[in-house]
Image (tube, grey):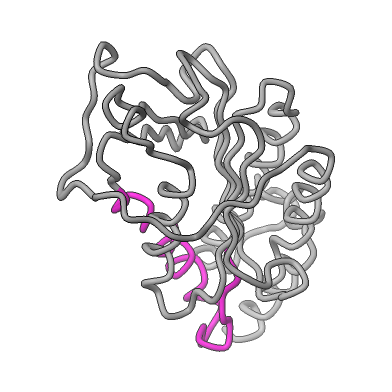
């Protein structure tokens, strides 16, 4: 799995410019059985509201040089230090064992299934808000949970535990960003390309006889190493 590697490297360069903190991958924070819903008046922090930057990125690799262990990293302030509306981003790099992927046709389904594990993460007092069309992810933090000490270590560990329920997931590196000075615009642009890779992968599998010259995903296939190789393998196997 290398089609996301170039984007992981670009995001890593963005992150290297920032001061970061490594958080513990442990938590005893309780989980809600159902999706958490919080009213604005019950919250002390809103991460990534509509008027501020908010994005997410989830990318996959099998290269241990890019993702070699489980990590939770914070750029900016932790939940206990935040107040009111705050810009937000959550980045997830997942190292997967691609030897368990028997054919390219399985790739899209497998990657989406791993991604959808995030919808099962419901920490008490933390309401996750996702807009997949705009590639935005934010959250509301209840006043009670903030006072009790909810942290990104807790949130990151919840995601980590959920992702690793898939046996193909080896390592998960997560980055939470609340810094006001971070380059969210560059990250947003990379996130849109990243999502385009996943959608293009599905497009290739469903439309093996398509004309590459007229395909709307041509720019992605031309610029991302490995995409054209997948397409050629599928054409050859027909």
111 drawn magenta: yes
Q: Quadrant of the N terminus?
A: bottom right
Q: Can residue 99 be seen?
A: yes
Q: Can residue 195 be seen?
A: no
Above or below, comparing residue 107 to residue 187 in the picture: below
Q: Residue at x 22, y 36 (%)?
A: 36
Residue 177 location (% of width, % of height): 61, 35
80 vs 94, nearest the viewer: 80
Q: Is residue 98 left or right of residue 122?
A: right
Residue 76 location (% of width, % of height): 64, 32
Q: For the magenta stretch, what is the residue range?
A: 94-121
113 vs 35, nearest the viewer: 35
Q: Residue at x 77, y 51 (%)?
A: 12
Q: Quadrant of residue 71?
A: bottom right
169 vs 149, nearest the viewer: 149
Q: Is residue 24 left or right of residue 193?
A: left
Q: Residue at x 66, y 37 (%)?
A: 75
Residue 238 location (% of width, % of height): 57, 83
142 drawn magenta: no
Q: Main secondary structure of the magenta part?
A: helix
């Amino acid at each position: 799995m290398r089609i996301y590697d170039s984007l992981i490297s670009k995001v890593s360069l963005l992150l290297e410019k920032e001061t970061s903190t490594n958080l513990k991958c442990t938590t005893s924070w309780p989980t809600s059985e159902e999706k958490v819903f919080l009213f604005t008046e019950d919250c002390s922090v809103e991460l990534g509201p509509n008027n501020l930057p908010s994005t997410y990125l989830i990318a996959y690799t099998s290269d241990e040089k890019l993702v070699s262990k489980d990590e939770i990293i914070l750029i900016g302030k932790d939940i206990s230090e935040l107040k009111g509306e705050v810009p937000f981003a959550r980045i997830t790099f997942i190292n997967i064992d691609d030897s368990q992927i028997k054919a390219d046709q399985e790739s899209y389904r497998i990657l989406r299934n791993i991604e959808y594990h995030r919808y099962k993460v419901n920490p008490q007092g933390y309401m996750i808000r996702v807009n997949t069309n705009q590639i935005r992810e934010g959250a509301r933090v209840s006043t009670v949970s903030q006072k009790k000490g909810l942290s990104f270590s807790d949130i990151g560990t919840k995601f980590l535990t959920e992702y690793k329920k898939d046996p193909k997931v080896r390592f998960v590196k997560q980055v939470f960003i609340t810094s006001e000075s971070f380059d969210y615009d560059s990250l947003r642009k990379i996130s849109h390309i990243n999502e385009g890779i996943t959608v293009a992968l599905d497009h290739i599998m469903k439309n093996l006889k398509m004309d590459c010259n007229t395909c709307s995903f041509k720019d992605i296939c031309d610029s991302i190493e490995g995409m054209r190789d997948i397409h050629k393998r599928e054409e050859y196997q027909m």
